[in-house]
Amino acid sequence: MEAISETFIVRRAQRHLEKGRIVIFAAGTGNPFFTTDTAATLRAIEINADMIIKATKVDGVYDKDPNKFLDAQKINELTYERAMDDNIKVMDDTSIALAKDNDLPIVVCNMFEKNNLLSIVNGNYDTCSIVKKLS
């Protein structure tokens, strides 16, 4: 990775963000058994992100696989505990637990829907699901 990008250093990434630059985290952490979901959550926490956006091929979290079950129900908001349920596969349990411990919301959205990420960044969560601490 050094041939095409900088090695990750927390303060350097924060400085780029302070200057209004876009920072892209890639290639995981270099640690075995550390998933890309967990790496993304860790990096989001390190830079004090407001949320982590899990862009995927579905428009949110469902009670069962919507590609296999016609009666699958979308869940707009759910707790970290519910997200770790075996039937619901949002991210791996380590990344969800890490997000929970740091009160970092996880927004799950369809990466193929036009302007979806922009809409989420602007505060519109109508087209996604949110995993967070519910009050």
Image (cartoon, grey):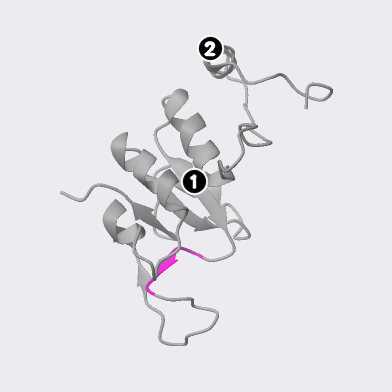
- Mark count: 2
- Residue most extreme to the right: 3
Residue ID for mark 2: 11
- SS state under label 1: strand
Residue 57 image offset from top left, x and y in percent: 59, 64
- Residue 79 is at least partly visible in this image: no
Asked if residue 62 lies in the magenta stretch, the reply is: yes
Q: Give the camera-side residue of 45 and 127.
A: 45
- Residue 25 is at least partly visible in this image: yes
Badge 1 amino acid: Ile
**Residue depicted at 46% across the width and 24% down the height:** 46
Badge 2 amino acid: Arg
Asked if residue 91 lies in the magenta stretch, the reply is: no
Q: Give the camera-side residue of 103 and 126.
A: 103
Q: Which residues are magenta?
A: 59-63
Q: Residues within 10 Å of mark 2 (few under 14, many from 20)?
A: few
Residue 3 to residue 82: above or below: above
- Residue most extreme to the front: 32
Q: Give the camera-side residue of 41 and 20.
A: 41
**Residue depicted at 34% across the width and 64% down the height:** 85
Residue 36 to residue 88: above or below: above
Residue 70 image offset from top left, x and y in percent: 47, 87
Q: Specify the label residue 53 is tagged with.
A: 1
Residue 27 image offset from top left, x and y in percent: 68, 36
**Residue depicted at 46% across the width and 41% down the height:** 52
